[in-house]
Image: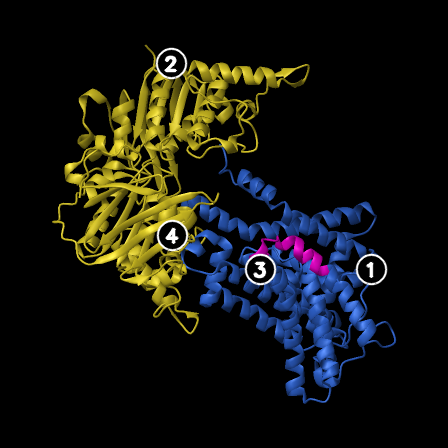
Chain colours: A blue, B yellow
């Protein structure tokens, strides 16, 4: 029995790696079929993100919201909840941070910047709190309600921008410099990338998730309720309150991701006609990262690297940038079919039957 | 005559453990053969080899005298070997007949022939006296009936050698009797049965011969006429077994639990506990005897605050605890060993260490200002693991991977160590082997000696007769009578449990 358990642990590490490898491999096959050189294509990605400061900076910049969105999904998942609403919470947080920065312009930077970041987290958290409340009180499944909340967020943010914060270019005004995370220093050392101080927020987020879940009584309760609501009730925990709390914290992470885009990358918010995709990529990042804080960082690095480096792939190897989306989709596909991979690994390691 | 099953010199090793070491098992045609041993002795491994789920490292298997190679359960089925699993493998939304034919459906012109299926199932059911309705949905039938469906599944596939894997663990006493009748009927119709069990009573009631396994080795194989329960128990455990008996004088102290006119509704809003009153004093074990489903579960859930009380009063140590939150009741001095250890008693995906502080994780010294003190928790966990003899690789092992007996020891350790004034123990030894039962009974008696009040709910009459100072018999949600275990008999208790109250009153 214990032998089997060890094997499963070993496999939780191997499965993501195999999935990535298979995804890249299948991507290469598709490139070959299209008459492109996959070695040149992948080579150009590696070359750009590791050797060209601009692409390195852009990769880290793209990682920031991905990490936070991944943490949001992973946090909820660790407590037995499936938060599909990261996308909506992210947009709500984005708008909240931008609105806070614009409306409270004039406050000193030391107050306005943290306040705007917190505004994003709070409103994102609120957007998670509602589905949590619905689940705890009325047993509404969080998958359904968070998907609905995504649409509410998409159109509500558009409405608010259009009616209250509108400026030319279908967007909000630019935020004041005193609320901005952008940095000339970081831009200079990365040859003009949009890298901003938000990476510090992302790092704090990673540490925070780890601390909350494994070092506090709150995290103990959250995980307990996630694993076994019945045993948690027996132990005198308030199951409903923990569900709500978990969704709110998850939403806060997502809101932070939005704030990073609003205060860092873009400095404003446009009227979105479609989802940003960051929230949904967060689900893939969490899955690939096995819902661990460090795993989320690594998975976000991979996705961000592929997306950013994919731009050079087009110019160097002539491979259409869309192919990178296919590779990412393939990796997610293989993660999803991890059961098959586990089964195959067991077979080949010769421990299954015979 | 050839054996129905002969397994010769079977050896099977897993990393770090030899589960079966040179095991030879011979089952005669037409007998009920018990495979007897503690949890983890290697019974299930051996049967999984016979059923084709594992391959032996060494040894051979003969079926009806012919050498057989069994590489998967299909081979086993083709050889006429069927397994009735402990955990049923049934589809709840399907009817009995649909479940039975699944995988081998009778066809007519390429379509499913449901009429034929129902007829076959009905005939089989009648032949072996199983009395199941083929058209009933599985979700609507009792656990005992579901087990019969499992038996029918093997019979439908033409099995003549049936393996029963701890079949009585989930059954009520009456259902156990019925199952034994069914097994005897099967044998009289020419089937052979292997019964995996660690319950002595069943072996002596049902079986012809027994093979005792301990730590992967055969200790002995003998016919039941030439042995007795004590000898078998000692063989299984490998040492003298001391049945724990409550022989401390009965000196009740102050009232700890006082339940007055309690009424509790069950999930279907029916009165499960109906105007029930009972008291438990310090230094006393009150046994609650009764057939499953007479309100025991609801009574305990009401006491522990997990279920709302409709009317009545529950006082613990003189404080009104009616409809208070579970945590408040726990803090007022309730220790609670729940009926379903995997559902309520443990967070299976938590480590042993985390489970050991499930009631106290938020208190000093395990946490301060909301921050867990891992060091203190680990230290406490190691101490309890040692003290309560929990067999685990360490406190970081997941509770899920422990055996049932060790899972229960984790719960007992956690609940008893807090030294609660009132200890509610619901089915504390269900499904455990003799060694673990002995240990847990010993702990309950120790607590009694310390002057704690203990409410013991059990379906095992032996357990209650051995441990209780007073026995309250529960029937249809109220206490029908309270008897002295020294002056009663299983017969009298059986009658009371069925609702027949004697004319003269006791007390």
Left/right placement of residue A80 relative to residue A102 reads: left
B135 to B493, vertically: above or below: above
> What's the chain of the residue with tag 1?
A
Q: Quadrant of residue B234?
A: top left
Task: Nearest to the eye among marks 3 and 4: give it.
Answer: 4
| SS for dot 3 | helix
> What's the chain of the residue with tag 2?
B
Q: Which mark is residue B302?
A: 4
Task: Nearest to the eye among marks 1 and 2: give it.
Answer: 2
Task: Nearest to the eye among marks 2 and 4: give it.
Answer: 4
Asked if the residue under mark 4 is in contact with the one under mark 2, i.e. CB atoms within 8 Å, the reply is: no
Question: Do marks 2 and 4 both belong to one polypeptide chain?
Answer: yes
Q: Which mark is residue A314?
A: 1
**Residue at position x 34%, y 29% from top?**
B174
Q: Residues within 10 Å of mark 4 (few under 14, many from 20)?
A: many
Left/right placement of residue B507 relative to residue A167 reads: left
Q: CA distance from mark 1 to mark 2?
A: 71 Å
The residue under label 2 is: B65
B261 to B114, vertically: above or below: below
Question: Do marks 1 and 2 both belong to one polypeptide chain?
Answer: no
The residue under label 3 is: A76
**Residue at position x 34%, y 47% from top?**
B275
**Residue at position x 65%, y 62% from top?**
A300
Task: Pick the quarter of the image with the N terminus of chain A.
Answer: top left
Report whether residue B403 is seen.
Answer: no
> What's the chain of the residue with tag 4?
B
Task: Nearest to the eye among marks 1 and 3: give it.
Answer: 3
Image location (x, y in percent) of residue B413: 30, 54
Q: CA distance from mark 2 to mark 3?
A: 58 Å
Q: Quadrant of residue B39?
A: top left
């Amino acid at each position: 029995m214990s032998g089997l358990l060890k094997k499963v642990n070993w496999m939780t590490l191997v499965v993501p790696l195999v999935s990535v490898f298979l995804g890249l491999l299948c991507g290469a096959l598709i490139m070959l079929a299209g008459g492109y050189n996959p070695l040149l294509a992948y080579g150009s990605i590696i070359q750009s993100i590791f050797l060209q400061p601009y692409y390195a900076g852009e990769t880290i910049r793209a990682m920031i919201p991905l990490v936070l969105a991944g943490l949001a999904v992973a946090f909820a998942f660790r407590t037995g909840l499936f938060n599909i609403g990261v996308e909506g919470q992210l947009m709500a947080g984005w708008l909240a941070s931008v609105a806070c920065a614009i409306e409270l312009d004039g406050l000193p930077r030391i107050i306005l910047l943290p306040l705007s970041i917190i505004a994003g987290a709070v409103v994102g958290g609120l957007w998670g709190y509602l589905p949590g409340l619905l689940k705890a009180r009325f047993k509404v499944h969080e998958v359904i309600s968070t998907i609905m909340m995504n649409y509410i967020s998409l159109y509500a943010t558009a409405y608010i921008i259009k009616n209250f914060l509108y400026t030319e270019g279908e967007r909000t005004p630019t935020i004041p410099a005193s609320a901005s995370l952008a940095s000339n220093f970081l831009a200079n050392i990365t040859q003009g990338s949009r890298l901003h101080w938000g990476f510090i927020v992302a790092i704090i987020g990673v540490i925070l998730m780890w601390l909350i879940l494994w070092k506090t009584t709150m995290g103990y309760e959250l995980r307990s309720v996630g694993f076994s609501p019945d045993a948690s009730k027996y132990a005198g925990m308030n199951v409903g309150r923990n569900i709500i709390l978990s969704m709110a914290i998850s939403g806060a992470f997502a809101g932070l991701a939005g704030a990073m885009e609003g205060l860092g990358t873009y400095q404003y918010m446009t009227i979105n006609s479609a989802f940003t995709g960051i929230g949904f990529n967060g689900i893939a990042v969490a899955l690939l990262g096995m819902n661990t804080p460090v795993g989320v960082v690594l998975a976000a690095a991979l996705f961000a690297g592929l997306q950013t480096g994919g731009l050079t792939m087009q110019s160097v190897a002539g491979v259409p940038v869309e192919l990178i989306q296919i590779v990412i989709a393939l990796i997610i596909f293989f993660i999803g079919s991890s059961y098959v991979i586990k089964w195959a690994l067991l077979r080949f390691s010769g421990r299954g039957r015979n | 005559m050839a054996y129905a099953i002969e397994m010769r010199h079977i050896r099977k090793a897993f990393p770090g453990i030899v589960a079966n070491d040179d095991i030879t098992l011979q089952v005669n045609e037409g007998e009920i053969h018990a495979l007897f041993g503690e949890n983890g002795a290697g019974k299930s491994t051996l049967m999984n080899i016979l059923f084709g789920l594992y391959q032996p490292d060494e040894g051979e298997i003969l079926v009806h005298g012919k050498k057989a190679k069994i590489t998967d359960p299909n081979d086993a089925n083709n050889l006429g070997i069927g397994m009735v699993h402990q955990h049923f493998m049934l589809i709840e939304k399907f009817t009995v007949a649909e479940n039975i034919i699944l995988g081998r459906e009778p066809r007519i012109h390429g379509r499913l022939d449901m009429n034929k299926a129902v007829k076959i199932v009905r005939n089989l059911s009648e032949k072996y006296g199983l009395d199941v309705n083929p058209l009933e949905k599985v979700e609507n039938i009792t656990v005992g009936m579901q087990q019969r469906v499992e038996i029918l599944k093997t019979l439908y596939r033409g099995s003549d050698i049936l393996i029963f894997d701890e079949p009585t663990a989930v059954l009520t006493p009456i259902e156990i009797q019925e199952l034994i009748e069914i097994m005897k009927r099967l044998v009289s119709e020419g089937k052979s049965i292997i019964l995996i069990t660690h319950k002595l009573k069943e072996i002596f009631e049902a079986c012809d011969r027994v093979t005792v396994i301990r730590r992967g080795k055969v200790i002995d194989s003998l016919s039941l006429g030439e042995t007795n329960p004590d000898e078998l128990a000692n063989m299984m455990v490998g040492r003298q077994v001391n049945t724990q008996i409550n022989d401390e004088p009965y000196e009740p102290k102050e009232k700890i639990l006082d339940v007055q006119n309690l009424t509790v509704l069950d999930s279907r809003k029916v009165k499960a506990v109906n105007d029930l009153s009972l008291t438990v004093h310090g230094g006393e074990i009150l046994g609650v005897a009764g057939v499953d489903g007479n309100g025991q579960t609801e009574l305990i859930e009401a006491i522990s605050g997990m279920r709302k009380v409709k009317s009545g009063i529950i006082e613990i140590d003189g404080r009104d605890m009616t409809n208070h939150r579970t945590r408040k009741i726990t803090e007022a001095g309730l220790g609670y060993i729940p009926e379903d250890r995997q559902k309520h008693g443990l967070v299976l995906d938590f480590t042993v260490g985390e489970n050991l502080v499930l009631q106290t994780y938020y208190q000093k010294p395990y946490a301060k200002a909301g921050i867990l003190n891992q060091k203190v928790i680990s230290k406490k966990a190691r101490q309890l693991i040692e003290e309560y003899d929990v067999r685990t690789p360490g406190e970081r092992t997941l509770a899920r991977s422990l055996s049932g007996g060790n899972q229960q020891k984790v719960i007992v350790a956690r609940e008893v160590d807090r030294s609660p004034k009132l200890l509610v123990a619901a089915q504390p030894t269900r499904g455990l082997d003799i060694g673990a039962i002995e240990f847990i009974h010993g702990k309950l008696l120790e607590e009694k000696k310390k002057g704690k009040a203990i409410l013991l709910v059990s379906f095992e009459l032996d357990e209650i007769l051995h441990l209780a100072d007073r026995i309250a018999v529960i029937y249809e949600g109220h206490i029908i009578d309270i008897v002295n275990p020294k002056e009663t008999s299983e017969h009298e208790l059986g009658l009371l449990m069925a609702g027949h109250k004697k004319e003269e009153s006791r007390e």
